[in-house]
Image (cartoon, rainbow, N blue to C red):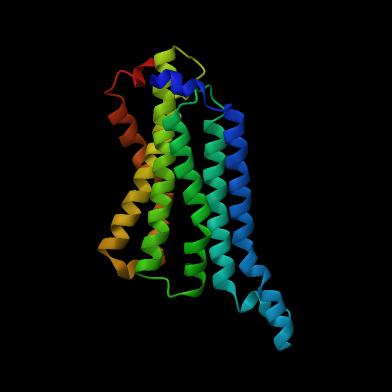
Amino acid sequence: MTRAGRDQHLPPSDRMVAFTDAAVAIALTLLVLPLVDIVPEVARTHEPPVTAVTEHLGQIGSFLLSFVVIARFWASHHRLFGYGHRLTRTLVQLNLVWVLTIAVLPFPTEMMALLPVRGFVVDLYLAVLVVCSGSLTAMAVLMRRNALADGDDEGVPESFVVGSLASTTTMVVALVVVLAVPALGPWALVILVADPVFTPVIRRLRGDGPASRTT
């Protein structure tokens, strides 16, 4: 059977998107569960209720960070699949990789909350983000190429691809920096806001290709 024939047997795209949204919702729920477990602990030790917050600021901060990260990734994924696209086996596989990283993120989040935030902990957190962003970028590039090949004017625009590439580049740089300078620890995460620095570079590089000039 040809690749086109195999792609015809794929389920509708909305089923994959619904599955992905459910996975994201579960991941967000898992993020907050460790915070919920704090309350019985405080009640058992008869500590003042305020200590549920003041004595667990690290856990709360890790939760908020990962909540924002997942929400940002989900928003980009939601926007990506709002464009015209053709479902392929490769696209489904890349989406599963993306879902895997979202499902795994609560694990390094809890490590950041309870373990010394340096070395392996930060490395693992950033590595998960790199794979998550990289798989989303790969989906964007694939969907744009398919749209161009199909003559679909409502496919993924070049601006989305550029933004996604810039985001992935930023996370790769953050991971390289923290691997090279472990003493930075969680401060390396500040680099994640540097997308605007890489966007014009990516746009210029992409401008050399024929695909980018079609927009």
Q: Is residue 97 above or below residue 64?
A: above
Say which quadrant the N terminus sits in.
top left
Residue at 71% x, 78% y: name it: 40
Image coordinates for residue 166, horizontal then vertical, percent: 38, 40
Q: Is residue 7 above or below residue 109?
A: above
Q: Is residue 211 left or right of residue 85?
A: left
Image coordinates for residue 100, horizontal then vertical, percent: 48, 49
Query: What is the quadrant of residue 187 in the picture?
Result: bottom left
- Name the outermost residue toward the top: 151
Image coordinates for residue 9, horizontal then vertical, percent: 52, 23
Residue at 39% x, 42% y: name it: 134
Q: Is residue 214 above or below residue 16?
A: above
Query: What is the quadrant of residue 119 in the picture?
Result: bottom left
Is residue 215 at all visible to an observer of this figure?
no
Image coordinates for residue 206, horizontal then vertical, percent: 31, 28
Report how many numbered discs are placed on residues in the image.
0
Residue at 54% x, 46% y: name it: 72
Q: Is residue 38 left or right of residue 157?
A: right
Closer-to-camera residue (93/185): 93
Residue at 63% x, 49% y: name it: 25
Query: What is the quadrant of residue 215 in the picture?
Result: top left
Is residue 131 at all visible to an observer of this figure?
yes
- Name the outermost residue toward the front: 1
